[in-house]
Image (cartoon, grey):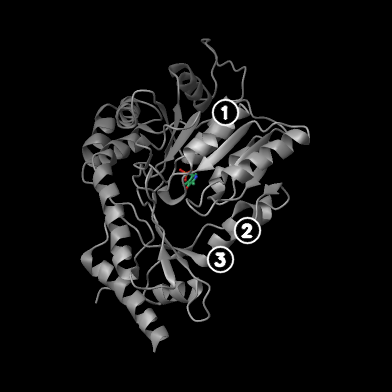
Amino acid sequence: MNNKRIFLSLSQQSGFEQKYIQKALDDNWITSGGPNVDDFEEVLENYLGAESHVTALNSGTSAIHLALVSLGVGIDDEVICQSLTFSASANPILYQTAIPVFVDSEPETWNICPEQLEIAICDRIRKGKKPKAIIAVHLYGNPYKADEIHKIAERYQIPVIEDSAEALGSSYKGKKCGTLGTFSILSFNGNKIITTSGGGALISKSKKAKEKAIFYATQSKDEAVHYQHSEIGYNYRMSNICAGVGLGQMEVLDKNIDSRIKMNHFYKAIFKNVKEIELFQTKGVFFSNYWLSTILIKENKSITPETLRLAFENANIECRPIWKPMHLQPVFSRYPYYGGNVAENLFKRGLCLPSGSHLTEEEKDRIKKVIHNLLNNYKS
Ligand SMILES: *Cc1c(COP(=O)(O)O)cnc(C)c1O
């Protein structure tokens, strides 16, 4: 049997990329910005809806950084950030020499907890500083409690940066993720639901904010014939070749979302009668693209997340713990944290399962076999 490694989330060409890449070469636009970048932004704007003004950038991390820059976050400003996330949500806070304030998750969506968020805001205000922004994340494609979070943000007049890096195609109450924040961001890194080989986007609410983002992303050049700069600039614009890859990928976005949801159903069937293991699924107003399917393994002496992970590893299948919360990361441990141990328990009890959009029936069988073998061993 073929024993090729199965990855957690692997990108795959759609077959449509080549014509756009060729167009970039034919146009002789082999640089950042250009016709493919404009077209890619337009396709994304059409997908997300009329209010969205998209700036294509070289990464999702750059997009978060420019959101902070656009909001005027600077030295010693405080920025609230969901603790249970990938480090790229929080790192740009430190690029601005601002201070991250981490907040725990709630168990229903695994994302930032409204109660703890409000406690954090009140306590920071009491200590003398109102947070300048809130970074909320749709982890694994599962939307956060947007109404609750945004209501609190409005009450204290704090802008929300919506980290939708993992959630293109997800929605909350029928509204697409990537359109909910004051600023929103997407990632087109190689492991995300679509790729540009490496890229991201900042989504703004106005044309003016988009133009400012492009200004920052292209070295903050003042209007002058010589190079003149009144503000710090960045080299963050998406390349015209990468945008070509993105245009090809957008043609299969819906198909990829459908495959990820089907992977979630595949796991649902496998774990249906397994009481030790609970597959995470969203309900009601929360629509997930199921970028990654995740499980929680109940406290149990026999089977642990690590035994399952190792069983997968032995079969050359990648499987990963839930992202380690930021407040537990050595690099962030000295910053304030509000909450209990919800995120920490998810980290301890959870696993991300292989969820790629292009797994073959044979590969799914390999995954199923590993799980069945392990469960049978523990039963006997
Ligand atoms: C991938 C990711 C990012 C960063 O995106 P890049 O394009 O890799 O820079 C930010 N936040 C989350 C939650 C992510 O998963």
Residue pointed to by mark 2: 341
In front: 197, or 128?
Answer: 128
Q: Residues within 10 Å of mark 3 (few under 14, many from 20)?
A: some
Q: CA distance from mark 1 to mark 2?
A: 27 Å
Residue appearing at x 48%, y 52% in the figure: 108
Mark 1 vs ligand 1: CB under 8 Å? Answer: no
Residue appearing at x 41%, y 43% in the figure: 198
Residue pointed to by mark 1: 154
Residue sitting farthest toward the right: 127
The label nearer to you, 3 versus 2, is 2
Name the amino acid type tagged 3: Lys
Q: Residues within 10 Å of mark 1 (few under 14, many from 20)?
A: few
The label nearer to you, 1 versus 3, is 1
Q: Would residue 172 be found to the left or right of residue 102 on screen? A: left
Q: Would residue 83 be found to the left or right of residue 27 on screen? A: right
- Whichever of labels 1 and 2 marks the residue nearer the N terminus, that label is 1
In front: 114, or 71?
Answer: 114
Residue 276 shows up from this direction: yes
In front: 337, or 87?
Answer: 337
Q: CA distance from mark 1 to mark 3?
A: 33 Å
The reply to whether callout 1 and callout 2 are in contact (CB within 8 Å) is no
The reply to whether callout 3 and callout 2 are in contact (CB within 8 Å) is no
Image position, residue 363 (x, y; %):
27, 68
**Which quadrant of the figure contains the C terminus?**
bottom left
Residue 250 placement: quadrant: top left
Q: Which mark is residue 116?
A: none
Q: Is residue 137 shown above or below 232?
A: below
In front: 18, or 331?
Answer: 331
- Whichever of labels 1 and 3 marks the residue nearer the N terminus, that label is 1
Residue 62 shows up from this direction: no
Residue pointed to by mark 3: 348
Name the amino acid type tagged 2: Asn
